[in-house]
Image (cartoon, rainbow, N blue to C red):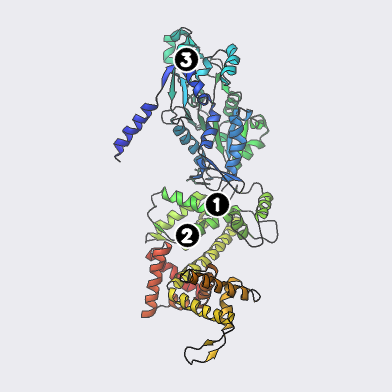
Amino acid sequence: MDILKKIEMYREEEEKLRWEGSFADYLLMLREKPWVAQSAHSRVYNMIKDAGIEEEKGTKRYNFFSHQLFGLEESLERLVEEYFHPAAKRLDVRKRILLLMGPVSGGKSTLVTMLKRGLESYSHNNRGSVFAIKGCPMHEDPLHLIPHHLRKDFQDEYGIRIEGNLSPLNMMRLEQEYGGRIEDVLVERIFFSEDKRTGIGTFSPSDPKSQDIADLTGSIDFSTIAEFGSESDPRAYRFDGELNKANRGMMEFQEMLKCDEKFLWHLLSLTQEGNFKAGRFALISADELIVAHTNETEYRSFISNKKNEALHSRIIVMPIPYNLKASQEERIYEKMINESDVSDVHIAPHTLKVAAMFTILTRLKEPKKGDIDLLKKMRLYDGENVEGFNSADVDELKKEYPDEGMSGIDPRYVINRISSTIIRKEVPSINALDVLRSLKDGLDQHPSITTELRERYMNYISLARKEYDNIAKNEVQKAFVYSYEESAKTLMDNYLDNVEAYCNKAKLRDPLTGEEINPDEKLMRSIEEQIGISENAKKAFREEVLIRISAFARKGKRFDYNSHDRLREAIQKKLFADLKDVVKITTSSKTPDEQQLKKINNVVARLVDEHGYNSTSANELLRYVGSLLNR
Ligand SMILES: Nc1ncnc2c1ncn2[C@@H]1O[C@H](COP(=O)(O)OP(=O)(O)OP(=O)(O)O)[C@@H](O)[C@H]1O
Ligand SMILES: [Mg+2]
């Protein structure tokens, strides 16, 4: 659809949602939709809840976050259940500043941005709608109009508790514009928008010397003092600080701990009671979520300063550690690459997976349990089955280091290395080896890495490389085997003939000499062993296969290569093993003969058509596997 048309539709949509009425009308609406009077924290919580919550293996997954934040389920659950949920219930935590603490590029800003964008769209929603006193620069809650002595009655009648005092500006407007008639005060629906500074604010510290608390709480408009006569006339005050503008929604406080101490103290004492002081006015009630973020070092030095103790108690700290699941890390890279200019470059299969393995290894701590290595731990964390371990072991591992994930390689570093790989390579196609090499080079240039750490990281690069070698070998062999569909079929027919003879205690006829021979036990076993069928279990397995065949025959269906999963697996594996030499010779021959060339072309075609390679990356893969097999 035409973009102009869309813009027009959006405007029309917003036009339709507009609402304006008297305070009396607003009260009528409250009877029908009491939720529109909810607090800012409750709105945030409901926004997250309304998007849907799924439960997976005892951990909650919030749809609200899950399409952009990967692998942070546990931290997010903690954030929602320990902060947003109680805050929505008007518990005291909501008066504290929420401080997200985590390592660089761990997704803190992304999280905050999601909340902001989420609120903007939620306020267009029926469930998230917000109403305010019309013309108020702070979009004040209309219920503040109800005088304190009537609030108890109001609560009994409507079931809604009112908190906060009518601001000095609206107090004055009530008298002057409405003659004190509360019921006539105009109320309107508002829509959160960071651009329009409605309900969403961002504060970032600048030069501590020039930073003024006015940026947060607004300031006197000196040009109007002459008109209104006094500095304490609320009309002479601009309520345009971030705290004012973010009222009813949320304010992001960037780099909070970088702020000057005095400033911070001032701010925190302002916000602790859910209200703040501006100019020469009585306290202004603020109903907003304040989120700040910081990294661990900054946070540690902040709390190690005794002077900050009191501040500390007014902050709720939520750790946002790195993701520790390799598969989720891969998704992070995919997302970041899709958002970048290099999204059209071909990235060979497994490239990002291998990079992610390296990254996760740098974030994990060495297990204390003796029988488990770092690679196994990585697999377990990612939900894979590792022989000899179960989910209880995973919980135990996690308990060993409750602060795991606060250090290691960050995703931005990996993306930077991937970009530099892309720029340096002439062809628009990169593979796992390119990226591992670039990650390694990057470590040499990295200024903030100690020699000891570099060594450890180099070790992880070799580990990731070994994993990749296995993946690469498998991939190529698979492509070879499938180009031998025919041989798989032949091998299976051969196996079945022997099994049939074995079960019927019969003999086979040698196709060449016509001689009667015994079933080929060696052949049958060489296939069965591939899937771990023991000597004792072989008879049962063979009989089961025969029963399956006759069941197929009864239904008039053909028993083929795909009719028995385990048998197919065994045949495939057997072919892998037998093929090793063919693959070796074909892939490493410098001057392939016609036959070999044909085979190579088939395999390349298969890798491209079925496994997501392009011809460059497929050829690179073949060459690499050839060199591996010849080592
Ligand atoms: N767990 C994650 N899921 C999805 N994306 C992530 C995750 N962690 C990091 N990212 C991505 O990494 C990049 C950096 O993240 P972001 O800017 O949110 O980090 P930050 O914690 O604010 O970092 P800083 O401390 O440097 O400000 C973003 O593109 C973000 O999408
Ligand atoms: Mg950030």
Q: Are marks 1 and 2 in contact (CB under 8 Å)?
A: no
Classify the position of the N terminus by image quarter: top left
Of callouts 3 and 1, the N-terminal one: 3
Indicate which disc residue 351 carries.
Answer: 2
User: How busy is the neighbourhood of tag 2: few (under 14 within 10 Å), some, or many (20 plus)?
Assistant: some
Q: CA distance from mark 3 to mark 1?
A: 58 Å
Instruction: Tell me the kind of residue under disc 1.
Output: Ile
Task: Classify residue 93 as left or right of residue 255.
Answer: right
Q: Residue at x 49, y 67 (%)?
A: 472
Can the viewer see residue 261? no
Dot 1 or dot 2: first in sequence order is 2
Q: Which tag, 3 or 2, sits closer to the chain's start?
A: 3
Give the SS element for disc 1.
loop
Give above or below for 257 relative to 509.
Answer: above
Q: Which residue is mark 3?
A: 24
- The quadrant holding residue 482 is bottom left
Bin the neighbour count of mark 1 within 10 Å (Cα to Cα): few under 14, some 14-19, many 20 and up: many
Q: Residue at x 47, y 52 (%)?
A: 333
- Single out the residue that lies furthest toward the top: 179
Comparing 342 with 519, the one in front is: 519
Q: Residue at x 43, y 23 (%)?
A: 189
Residue hosting label 1: 409
* Residue type for callout 3: Ala
Residue at mark 1 to residue at mark 2: CA–CA distance? 17 Å
Q: Nearer the viewer, mark 1 or mark 2?
A: 2
